[in-house]
Image (tube, rainbow, N blue to C red):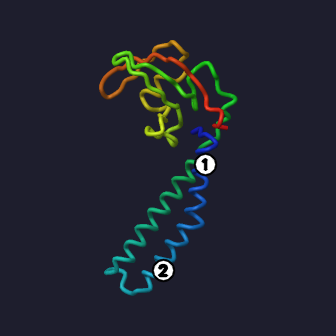
Amino acid sequence: MEYLSKQRYDEIESELKHLINVVYPRVQEDLAEASAQGDRSDNAGYREARRLQAKTISRIRFLQKILEHSRVIDPDVLPKDRVSLLSRVEFTNLSTDTRMVFEIVSPHEMDLEAGKISLKSPIGAALMGRKVGEIAEAQVPAGTVRLRIESITFDATQS
């Protein structure tokens, strides 16, 4: 079971509807047109249309599976005094004395450029359940890093 923010759940649902109602019918039309051009064994347009059909079907099935196995998390039920899903965490890397801020999200919402890390990432997993002032140790490719939690906040627009 995966938990998603309402915003991300809606984004996935919207993409799925677009694929089913707009993209896939267009792919089917392109495939029928390419098929009508004759010999399929030597028809690059037909092969490309089949490839695009398979890619579209694969994406549709993937998104359906995400939605089937996901639930929207109610941010009001999350603990506010410790790091949890949808919390924004400011922490200091004690090795480099560098401060960072990340929001802890599900793997399907991860976006490093937007400051969102997965709760299943080494740093996200190490921070989960910790309180302000606690030190977490994360195993990263470069070794073990020690992280001191400076603050925990929640974005009120997540619901």
Residue 95: % across, % down: 34, 16
Marker count (numbered): 2
**Label 1 sits on what residue type?**
Glu
Determine whether, in the image, residue 122 is placed left or right of residue 11. left
With respect to residue 17, does 40 lie above or below? below
- Comes first in the chain, label 1 or label 2: 2
With respect to residue 127, does 38 lie above or below? below
Q: Residue at x 53, y 67 (%)?
A: 23
Please identify the quadrant where the C terminus is shown: top right
With respect to residue 132, does 63 lie above or below? below
Q: Residue at x 40, y 67 (%)?
A: 51
**Label 2 sits on what residue type?**
Ala
Q: Residue at x 51, y 74 (%)?
A: 28
Disc nearest the viewer among 1 and 2: 2
Q: Secondary structure at mark 1?
A: helix
Q: Residue under circle 2?
A: 32
Residue most extreme to the top: 133
